[in-house]
Amino acid sequence: MPRSSEVQVDRSNGPGARIALVVDRLDWHARALTSAFAGLGARALAVALPSCAIDTGVPCALTIPGFGHRLPDAVMVRSMSGGTFEAVTLRLGVLHALRELGVMVWNDARAIERCVDKSTTSFLLARAGIPTPATWATESREAARAIVRRETSRGPLVLKPLFGSQGRGLKLIRAPEDLPHAADVAGVYYLQRYVAVEREGFRDFRLLVSQGRLVAAMVRHAANWITNVKQGGRPVAAVVDADMKGLAIRAAAAVGADFAGVDILHGTDGRPTVLEVNSMPAWSGLQKVTATSIASVIAGDMVAALGQKGRRGAAV
């Protein structure tokens, strides 16, 4: 098996960069990214992680469909389907292996793991000094009940699925009796201080960050406290201030994400606080309220980073 510096990338179909675009399906986002890469002279080839494999009998010890025994120039992870713990571990292992071989991966397995596990996101945000709701995560229902008894005197808590997305499975907890049985939460109680404020409805912000800068932002309005677009939230264009922009950029950096969707809302004190960081953000709602082609920005950032990497390699 060659060292990472000796690994060959596949340029057999032309001089442009070849990108493995990791997707579960060829949705609107995948088509937009493919078109954006093509406009930059790069070729994006859709790849499903379940079809990849570790194979120590081939030169790179990996097989990536469409690339033969060579490797792509870069990998962009747009989406990753669920599965058994073993299956997801193997898929993340493939992404880890690609990074070890020197392939640029956005976002890499480390960032994905940090964002998919909300408790790790909360830990990293708090450790970085980024305002985020007080958070508790435990496998013990009795410990969770004790937390609820102690903390709900200051207001309700929110119970979230540790691996949930798009606002599904959220529950307000006002008393210990509101906690479901362990089997209903996959054995983990992930609780956060409820910080939403009703101001003629509810709202929060989604900021999309790429390579340390803000790409676009929107505010999501909803009749209830769950503001996700998939749950009925209405996206509206937003101009955010320097504080919110700085928080989003710092939050993406805290989890090690090259690009990310950062959810922010203002609490009762009027100050912004980071709720979540998404390492595989959808942006169809955001695209509807911004003139910037988000796919073009993200694709352009990756191609530019590849160029910088190539120049550094040539200098060595």
Image (cartoon, grey):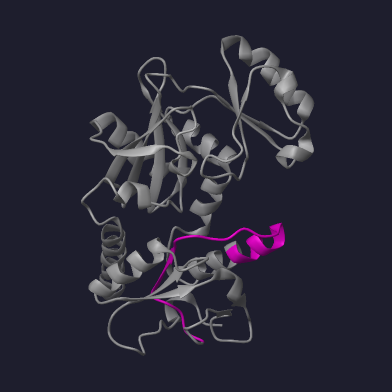
Q: Quadrant of residue 107?
A: bottom left
Q: Which residues are magenta?
A: 69-91
Quarter in which the C terminus is drawn:
bottom left
Residue 74 located within the stretch drawn in magenta: yes
Q: Is residue 314 visible?
A: yes
Q: Nearer the viewer, residue 195 or 53?
A: 195
Quarter in which the N terminus is drawn:
bottom right
Q: Quadrant of residue 29?
A: bottom left
Q: Is residue 49 above or below residue 301?
A: below
Q: Is residue 235 above or below residue 259?
A: above
Residue 171 located within the stretch drawn in magenta: no
Left or right relative to 55: residue 3: left
Kindly identify the residue that appears in the image at 46 percent across and 23 percent down: 196
Q: Residue 85 at x, y = what percent?
A: 70, 57
Q: Residue 227 at x, y = what percent?
A: 45, 34
Name the outermost residue toward the bottom.
12
Kindly identify the residue that appears in the image at 26 percent across and 61 percent down: 296
Q: Is residue 285 above or below residue 200?
A: below
Q: Residue 75 at x, y = what percent?
A: 43, 68
Q: Residue 146 at x, y = what percent?
A: 73, 18
Kindly identify the residue that appears in the image at 53 percent across and 71 percent down: 48
Name the outermost residue toward the left.
291
Kindly identify the residue that appears in the image at 55 percent across and 48 percent down: 116
Left or right relative to 274: residue 137: right
Name the outermost residue toward the top.
153
Q: Is residue 312 visible?
A: no
